[in-house]
Amino acid sequence: MEPHDPATSPHPPRLTGAHVRAARAVLVAVLARLSQDAAGGEPAAMARLHACAALFGRLGTTGGAPPAVDLGPDEAAVLRAGTAEAIAAHADGIRAAATGVPVDGDDDLHGLTASLGRLVALRDALDGADAPALAVPAGGEAGPELLQAFADLMPVPLWLTRPDGTAWFANRPAIDLLGGRGRRDPVAAADPSDGGATARATRAARDEGRSYDVEAPVRCADGVERVVRLRGIPEIGPGGRVTGYLVTAEDTTTARRDARDATSRIDALAAVARAQATAGTPAEAARAFLEVVMGALGAGAALLAVFSGDDELEFLATPGWPPELTEPFARFPLSADFPLSVSVRTGDAIWMGSEADWRARFPHSVRLHGDAGFAASAVLPLPGRGHTIGGMALSWTGDRAFGAAERAFLTAAATVAGQAMASLQAIDVEREGHRRALRAERTMRRFAAACGAVFAAGDPATLAEAAAAGAARLTGAVRCEVHFDTGAASARAAVGFAHAADLPDVAPVRRALRGPDGGEIGAITDWTPPGTPVPDAEAVEWFVSLVATRAHAAGAPVGAPPLQSLMADFGRLLDRPSPSA
């Protein structure tokens, strides 16, 4: 008989006998739910409740049931939905009982199995299927046909064994797992490579009438060896005697592999922290971090960029990427429509598992990514101390699924890296402040020594020598010449290399000495090699003015120099960053 379809068949479903009783049980649960839905007085909910109550009345009273009930289309639809919910609830209860979870009242494994059989028979009757209800023997225990029907629906391999462990029943998933051996003792199917440990552990548990939980290598029906977890729950008969075991199996191969992967990735995160803790600069830390993460996940290349301003990102490390592809983008705006810019800007990770994902999200960048030979990428922001400090991206040559465990690891790694990079940046700022303080102190000492010598000079020649030596100190020059002629006094002096001709690759810098009227009275010329730290321009300018003033005074002693006032004025120069190390 074909399943009944109310829309095409003139024959409505008919319920008889046990099906009517099962339908009444289903309607009790449906009425309870509909009563809650109709509590607010909504007309449609009230209408459904009244229709279901009317059907319940048509199915008879508890004391007796009519021999047969023909259902209308709407009535059959209500019962089908209720029966499907009841079957699902019973299946959950059976799985709980089969795995040893305590159940209340009469809802033990046998009781739930018998109820499920009645519900399945009711469902078949509602569908008009040509399948008679399976008999449930007196005493509530399921017959073998019903047990097989229920057990085959379960998603886990299941065996029923005698007290000695020999199996007398196996469901379809158990047979699929072990092939022909699935009908035998599941413990006996364990590979002997475990040295008999599985057999000894389960035998000891059976001898003592207790449950067991073991893992064993098993050669499965498809020829693949897997690690399977076997759990046996004793069935207790009259007088507390163990009458058999309910055994379930779970393939833990993937779980064990995931656990190993998680352990290795945790070790990788620790390596990230160690690498960054020992790195000297943020750039060194970035490379160390990326190399660890690339090794943990088998990535072919990676990028890490941090803010170089309010609206610009700068690469710190690009291991695995061809320089010709990254150097043109060493700095790029935060507003750019690049994956890294978008991730940093939004604070969200971007997962692109294939070239198709790239093409859908960033079509203008897919060629650049493909030219480097990569297909999949993971792009994540780097959270620092309360704000995003940059972002990172890893790339693979093949497609990638980015499972939950891998996403969690990458997110954790980005957090570790972001915090470490923020700390290194703070240390770098502190170091720069310390370097600035040292530079300022050195400049102060040089400036004080140079000015003191100029102030102390008592004649033009001594003044010229002091000016040349002081200018060389301030500028780092390898040769410095000073000459002036005010009419009343003149002098010339030089320090450093004997002749300017000895410095063919060093261009001279000439600074004019001017009198009160602005006219030139001389000059200070220095030869400073390329790469020499740039002197403080304002300090040098002030020194040149001092030399010009003293030269115009014809080198006459000026008594106690106002050095304290001079140093107070120069102090403001030290509050701004020095231009070089």
Image (tube, rainbow, N blue to C red):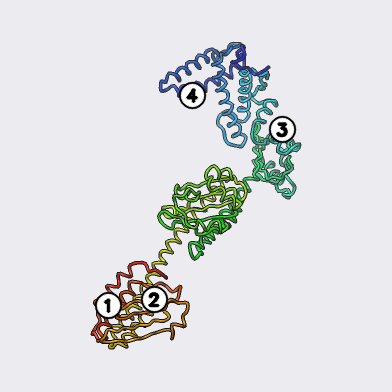
Q: CA distance from mark 3 to mark 4?
A: 38 Å
Q: Which mark, by number, is residue 169?
A: 3
Residue 251 located left or right of residue 368:
right
Q: Residue at x 58, y 32 (%)?
A: 92
Residue 380: x percent and y percent? 50, 50
Q: Report helix, strand or loop for mark 1.
A: loop
Question: Disc 1 vs disc 2: Cβ atoms closer than 8 Å?
Answer: no
Kindly identify which residue carries mark 4: 33
Q: Amino acid at mark 2?
A: Val
Q: CA distance from mark 2 to mark 4?
A: 94 Å
Residue 390: x percent and y percent? 46, 54
Kindly identify which residue carries mark 2: 509
Numbered disc in front, either 2 or 3: 2
- Quadrant containing the N terminus in the rendered view: top right
For this rendering, which residue is in front, 202 or 6? 6
Numbered disc in front, either 1 or 3: 1
Q: Earlier in the sequence, mark 3 or mark 4?
A: 4
Q: Is disc 3 surrounded by few (<14), some (14 to 19) or many (20+) residues within 10 Å?
A: many
For this rendering, which residue is in front, 128 or 392? 392
Q: Earlier in the sequence, mark 1 or mark 3?
A: 3
Numbered disc in front, either 1 or 2: 1
Question: Disc 4 vs disc 1: Cβ atoms closer than 8 Å?
Answer: no
Q: Residue at x 45, y 47 (%)?
A: 346
Kindly identify which residue carries mark 1: 519
